[in-house]
Amino acid sequence: MNQAIIVAGLLAAAALPGCSSLELLERDQVVEFKDCLDKIQYYSSGEIILSRVLRSEERKVSHRHHIRIEMGKRIEEIIISAHTPGVLAEKGSDPPDLLLVHFETPTPTNALAFRYNPKDQAYHLDTDDWKVAYEGKEYEVVKQGGLLIDVRKIRETKRKQRVLPGVKLAR
């Protein structure tokens, strides 16, 4: 019994260094890394759920989406789980107030917009009265989230960047 507890404790301790250091993406990080924003791995901060009622003539939806029946209506849901990885599709102004991020294989219409919020200095899903456009259709935002980045990996990347001064021959 005691050996099992000790082994479990050692395994938990060994796993700690591998834990990621995900933090909300903040404005100062976007400004600092503005030239390499497309090389950063983004993550959803929490579960994001988009929902819409299917019209009667719509017979099928993408295999990546869920359909559920609610009070006789067919509801299509797009669920982005917490910590789902995403890639930058596009950034707005400089420094960007708006970042477009893909959480599935990129197409021209499947990026979600995340807008800078000055209240907490972070980027959150940008909605228009709790609605977003996705794949050319309007969805209601049921659950909202923000953007995370792995700060440890960003700092590692920054540490690896340097400019060499060159070497001259001695005379």
Image (tube, rainbow, N blue to C red):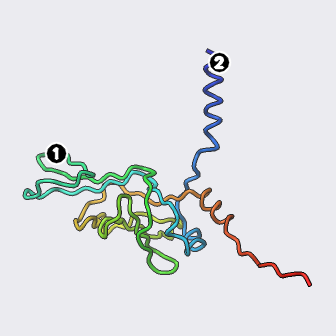
Which residue in the rendered view is the most extreme toward the right? Answer: 171
Which image quadrant is residue 165 in?
Answer: bottom right
Instruction: Give amino acid for label 2.
Output: Gln
Vertical relation: 84 (above or below) 31: above
Q: Find numbered disc 1 in the image and state the secondary structure of the residue it sits on.
A: strand
* Image-based side of 171 in relation to 70, left or right: right
x and y percentages locating residue 54 in the rendered image: 15, 56
Q: Residue at x 60, y 62 (%)?
A: 154
The residue to which callout 2 is attached is 3
The residue to which callout 1 is attached is 69
Specify the label residue 167 is tagged with: none
x and y percentages locating residue 81 in the rendered image: 39, 49
Q: Residue at x 52, y 78 (%)?
A: 95
Between 50 and 88, the one nearer to me in the picture: 88
* Image-based side of 160 in relation to 168, left or right: left
Crowding near pointer 1: few (<14 within 10 Å), some, many (20+)? few
